[in-house]
């Protein structure tokens, strides 16, 4: 018994076990057998749905996958037959789809060339157009694994953003199916939507961050409330990693707070405050104006929006007293020429100090206002009493002092200012 255990330990330590070495010698025979199955004529004893012996084909492909993993020589010997399987298998029946799925698994696992991987991705793209939700789910799940593996490989090569991907790489082929993947977010099956969401999150890079983040925000409006917290965290990670500029980052985070401020985590709120605080004065003015408008339009339920908005109003309230206009830079097309669509200017009118105070006061008067928002509002009133000292009327300043002192007898220590 002891000798047997020692022998098994030695096998585990070896890179190539005796059994694997023996089977590697059979790769040419296995590829020949698989090729014969593809070319064989009608055989009623073994044919299913027009496919010759699909069970045997699946088993051979599985064995080839095990043998070709981390073995360039074996992978090279099976590349041709894998290509033949991928291009000649009938897809109208489930038997053919099962073989194609196994072929894709094998192509992605072995040391295949880029052309074969592109072919595998295109097969999965066709699966996404299938009406059968089981096939679509399998395709999304497999594509997600492919993307994760591709990102890991690019991280090793210090090219995590995919800038070095050529037009014939698997990553580029996957991007061509982006619209089909985005359409899966509209599927009534929640499992399909969640798989598509996971895949889209991995597909984001510096080139498509604007489009895909927009799709994520659109889905955030419709997704179940229990999933919104995780969605907000994912959008924050995408924005932090791939944001093209500070204005787009702040704008995206504010939009997210208006949609799911009730469900977003404190980390998302804190990150938004940090990015606004680190920005230029022009961007702070834009963010404060936009947050004030969002607070006025809100029904008081978006806690995260109120926390961030009230903080910004207290910190940069003096910027609200001036008109604000932003003229976006005209976009440039891929060929370097100006795009056809004209950029839309963004303008906000100056707001009177009394109206700013009333807006924050109305937030605190709502029955649903959480205590943390009231604490922020109290600090906001204290800051505004100093920032509006040279601009506001005496009546407004007196009101601010009364609002600061109104909670001296509160049960909350944080409210006793």
Image: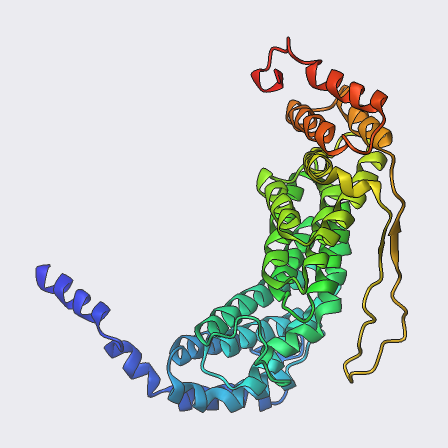
Q: How is the image coloured?
A: rainbow
**Closer to the camera in the image, 16 or 395:** 395
Q: Is residue 31 left or right of residue 192?
A: left
- Residue 180 falls in image quadrant: bottom right
Residue 262 vertical placement versus 240 (above, below): above
Residue at (74, 37) in percent of width and height: 313
In the displayed structure, would residue 355 be above or below residue 67?
A: above
**Which quarter of the image is occupied by the C terminus?**
top right
Q: Give the x, y percent position of residue 350.
A: 88, 42
Determine whether 360 is above or below 258 in the image. Answer: above
Residue 400 x %, y %: 76, 22
Residue under the image location 39 percent in, 86 percent down = 72
Q: Position of residue 351 (x, y in %)?
A: 87, 38
Query: Residue furthest toward the left?
Result: 2
In the rendered view, does 34 fall on the left or right side of 1? right
In the image, is residue 25 above or below residue 307?
A: below
Q: Quadrant of residue 131?
A: bottom right
Residue closest to the eye, 251 or 111: 251
| Rendering coords of residue 209 (x, y %) | 68, 64
Q: Nearer the viewer, residue 398 or 42?
A: 398
**Residue shown at the point (33%, 88%) measured from the top left:** 25
Q: Quadrant of the N terminus?
A: bottom left
Residue 289 appears anywhere in the view: yes
The furthest residue to the top: 409
Q: Nearer the viewer, residue 249 or 323?
A: 323
Asked if residue 48 shows in the view, the reply is no
């Amino acid at each position: 018994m002891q000798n047997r255990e020692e022998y098994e330990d030695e096998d585990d330590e070896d890179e190539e076990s005796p059994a694997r070495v023996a089977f590697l010698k059979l790769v040419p025979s296995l590829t020949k057998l698989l090729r014969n199955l593809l070319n064989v004529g009608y055989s009623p004893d073994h044919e299913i749905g027009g496919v010759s012996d699909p069970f045997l084909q699946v088993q051979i492909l599985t064995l080839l996958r095990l043998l070709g993993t981390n073995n360039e020589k074996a992978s090279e010997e099976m590349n041709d037959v894998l290509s033949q399987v991928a291009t000649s298998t009938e897809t109208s029946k489930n038997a053919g789809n099962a073989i194609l799925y196994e072929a894709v698994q094998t192509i992605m696992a072995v040391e295949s060339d880029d052309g074969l991987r592109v072919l595998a991705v295109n097969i999965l793209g066709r699966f996404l157009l299938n009406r059968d939700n089981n096939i679509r789910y399998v395709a999304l799940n497999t594509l997600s694994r492919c993307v994760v593996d591709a990102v890991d490989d690019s991280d090793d090569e210090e090219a995590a953003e995919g800038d070095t991907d050529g037009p014939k790489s698997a990553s580029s082929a996957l991007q061509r199916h982006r619209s089909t993947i985005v359409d899966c977010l509209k599927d009534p099956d929640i499992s399909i939507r969640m798989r598509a969401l996971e895949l889209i999150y991995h597909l984001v890079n510096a080139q498509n961050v604007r489009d895909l983040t927009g799709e994520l925000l659109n889905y955030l409006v419709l997704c179940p409330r229990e999933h919104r917290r995780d969605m907000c965290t994912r959008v924050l990670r995408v924005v932090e990693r791939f944001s093209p500029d500070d204005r787009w980052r702040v704008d995206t985070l504010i939009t997210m707070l208006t949609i799911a401020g009730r469900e977003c985590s404190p980390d998302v709120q804190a990150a938004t405050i940090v990015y606004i605080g680190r920005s230029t004065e022009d961007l702070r003015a834009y963010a404060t104006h936009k947050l004030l408008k969002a607070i006025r339009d809100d029904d008081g339920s978006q806690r995260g929006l109120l926390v961030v908005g009230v903080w910004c109003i207290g910190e940069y309230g003096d910027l609200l007293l001036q008109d604000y206009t932003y003229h976006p830079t005209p976009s440039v097309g891929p060929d370097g020429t100006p795009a056809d669509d004209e950029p839309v200017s963004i303008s906000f009118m100056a707001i009177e100090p009394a109206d700013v105070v009333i807006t924050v006061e109305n937030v605190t008067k709502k029955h649903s206002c959480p205590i943390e928002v009231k604490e922020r509002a109290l600090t906001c009133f204290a800051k505004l009493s100093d920032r509006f000292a040279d601009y506001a009327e005496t009546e407004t300043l007196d009101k601010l002092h009364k609002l600061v002192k109104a909670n001296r007898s509160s049960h909350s220590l944080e409210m006793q200012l």
